[in-house]
Image (cartoon, rainbow, N blue to C red):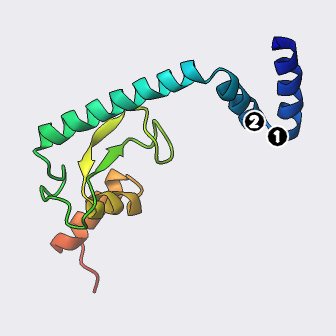
Amino acid sequence: MIDVLIVLGGLWLAAFGICAVLFAVAFFFGAPISAYRHKRREERTARTMAAFEEQGGVCAICGNKCTSGRTLSVDHDHSCCPGSASCGKCIRGLLCTRCNMGLGYFLDDANRLRAAVSYLSGSDSVE
């Protein structure tokens, strides 16, 4: 059976890439992978709930509850984990939709945010 899996895995790797091999492993040996994913999900949920309680259920930036009807978003350092998923170790806090999108539009760049604050306060007004 293992020899067949190795041959199938090699053929799948050549035809479909590494994802197909991982799918085959998950299909045939799914229990350990599922247990691992379940444990990671529990750990992420526990960290998120701890941050929620620590922040009092409000946005870490504006201090308001999320008004869009959605839950607070988990903000993480994108230099650690590019994309939308986080390893869980780089979580900065929970943000409402507007503040989270605002940071995204400023590309998480503190210098851009400082320039925006300077602009809004009128010290570098455009004439």
Is 91 rendered above or below residue 4?
below
Residue at position x 48%, y 28% in the image? 37
Q: Position of residue 114 (x, y in %)?
A: 26, 58
Residue at position x 55%, y 18% in the image? 32
Marks 2 and 1 in Cβ contact (< 8 Å): yes
Quadrant of residue 42 within the rendered picture: top left
The numbered dot on residue 49 is none
Q: Residue furthest bottom?
A: 127
Residue receiving disc 1: 16
The amino acid at mark 2 is: Ala
Residue 89 seen: no
The amino acid at mark 1 is: Phe
Quadrant of residue 31 within the rendered picture: top right
Quadrant of residue 64 within the rendered picture: bottom left
Q: Position of residue 69 (x, y in %)?
A: 24, 65
Calculate the distance from the C-alpha at mark 2 to the C-alpha at mark 1: 6 Å
Left or right of 85 in this view: 66:
left
